[in-house]
Amino acid sequence: MRKCLSALSIAGFVVCAIALSTGEEGLASERASAEEATVEAAGVEAQRQLSVEQKEERPESISSDTGIRTAMSGPAQIDISVSRIGKNTQHDYREYGIAGDIAAFSAATTACNVGTEIAEWISGSSGRHPLIAQNMYRMSADGERFEMIGMSWLKHSFCALSETTCGNCISGTGCEALGIGCADTYTASRNGSTNLGPRRDVNPVGLQYGGSGPGTHDHPYPSPSGPGLIAGRLQVNVNDLSHAGAKYYIEIHYITHDEDLNNRYNNASWVHVNMPPSPYTGNITSNLPISEQQIVLIAWQEEWEDTETPVIIREIKDSQRGMFQLAWRVSDNGDGTWHYEYALHNLNSHLAASSFAIPIPEGVTLTNFGFHDVSYHSGDGYPGSGTFDGADWASEDAGADGNRALTWSTVTFDDDPNGNALRWGTTYNFRFDADTPPQDTTAAIVHYRGSTDGPGAPGSLNGTTQGPSPLEAGCVGDIDTDGDVDAFDLAMLLGAWGPNAGHPADFDEDGDVDAFDLAMLLGAWGPCP
């Protein structure tokens, strides 16, 4: 009810109060805890006072559905961004402890309408309100890897406060809309409530799968399953929180229903956080400013800025169906091989992805294949199936005659609607080593869904990236590829003698560097033809 008291009009108060009293969206169950009351009291009281002082200067609230729709017509556009994370009147994160090997967290969030038209914020079963996703990432101590390690279910927003923390707020819109230049804050307690909905049916850029119209989502939605301490919240395996020297980041992504598609690419922001030690009930803190309107992969890019091995990020737009972002970094291992590290982020494509492939030239030797994903949880799968499958994507190095590729893949939607797809708001990693330096190439992404409602033959996307270059000109026996089969190559062969599958001196590729390979080298002695 405190949120209703902060509404900037009587009409807005009535709408919000009715929603609370009738149980729409389960708001009546969201009783603020004593801890939340302590955090929110100052901010709510200040907002209430602001309402009183400026009441006479503000226009009447737009409380009817027709009124809001009329006000939003015309060329003006809505644009929602995240302006604050983990901050209300003070640091505002929640740490819930551990259930099994899973720790749970939540963060306060503030959204701003930086557009030129009011945004719908209608509570309840209409589905016409933003959704709030919380994610956690980790960068390894050496900066080599940047991985998503946790995600939450979705907080359904309600009753916009139209606060003045992000600009010149033109309020007077009541609970049902967020005014131009206005902000709306949710405490960590509210974002970590158990009244959260699954991500599975939400299409961030178009018609919602199973929804009733453009930009809507299903109501009523199921409650998360599992231990009450962690159910639906931002869940992270404790093993992912015990990496010495690692850096941690929280990303917040608002999913809207009434923005133009081109304004839905800036709905995420991130912040670097300091994590408490096990059992993760201490205070999360952040001493750095929020990075607004950016995907969290930018943090990895900034780590390697102005170096000889930078992180490169490219956007891969899927027409009117969303966007992927591909980040990669290639580094010299110093032993004649190079490490290739990719992070593929699905920002908002409901078609998702089921395959990722990098072209590989003939003769290039690959080793150390790797894959990393994030775990779904709390019964996020389709009804009756539990949680989405978490099986790692299988890797395959296959093809010849210029069609060789290293491909990671999972099932398609037609195979299994609960497969481990790269769904919107998630990042998967792919990695390997190769014995040639990088060159520009094209990565291939295959969709998971064939259509926005699921079935059909999946399409594909291509994106610019880097991959291994062809081997330099040489011949059998020319291990160091200097154009001559000589004593240097002989020394390398003898140094690799014995079982050594994949070594360049294993000319007959039988898994052993032996007398047969020695004979081939001696038979090719001298300059390569």
Image (tube, grey):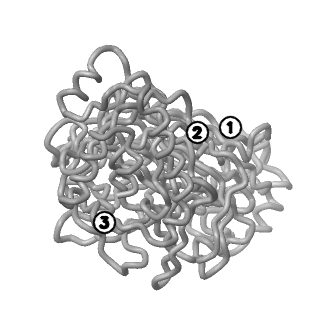
Which residue is drawn at the image coordinates 35% and 51% (left, top)? 4
Residue 387 lies in quadrant: bottom left
Residue 312 x/y as whole percent: 63, 38
Looking at the figure, which quarter contains the C terminus?
Answer: top right
Q: Amino acid at mark 1?
A: Ala
The answer to whether one can see residue 109 in this image is: yes
Please name the residue that numbered disc 2 is placed on.
292
Q: Amino acid at mark 2?
A: Glu
Considering depth in this image, is 240 or 7 the residue closer to the camera? Answer: 7
Q: Mark 3 or 2, which is nearer the eye? A: 2
The answer to whether 391 appears left or right of 374 in the picture is left
The answer to whether 216 appears left or right of 137 in the picture is left
Please name the residue that numbered disc 1 is placed on.
473
Q: Residues within 10 Å of mark 1 (few under 14, many from 20)?
A: few
Which residue is drawn at the image coordinates 28% and 38% (left, top)? 459
The answer to whether one can see residue 450 in this image is: no
Q: Residues within 10 Å of mark 2 (few under 14, many from 20)?
A: some
**Disc 3 on helix, strand or loop?**
loop
Residue 165 x/y as whole percent: 56, 39
Considering depth in this image, is 286 or 189 the residue closer to the camera? Answer: 189
Which residue is drawn at the image coordinates 40% and 51% (left, top)? 132
Looking at marks 3 and 1 on the same chain, the residue that comes earlier in the sequence is marked by 3
Please name the residue that numbered disc 3 is placed on.
388
Considering depth in this image, is 127 or 68 the residue closer to the camera? Answer: 68
Looking at marks 2 and 1 on the same chain, the residue that comes earlier in the sequence is marked by 2
Separation of residues labelled 2 and 1 (CA atoms): 48 Å
Residue positioned most to the bottom: 100
Considering depth in this image, is 255 or 25 the residue closer to the camera? Answer: 25
Looking at the figure, which quarter contains the N terminus?
Answer: bottom left
**Disc 1 on helix, strand or loop?**
loop
Please tell me the numbered disc located at residue 512: none
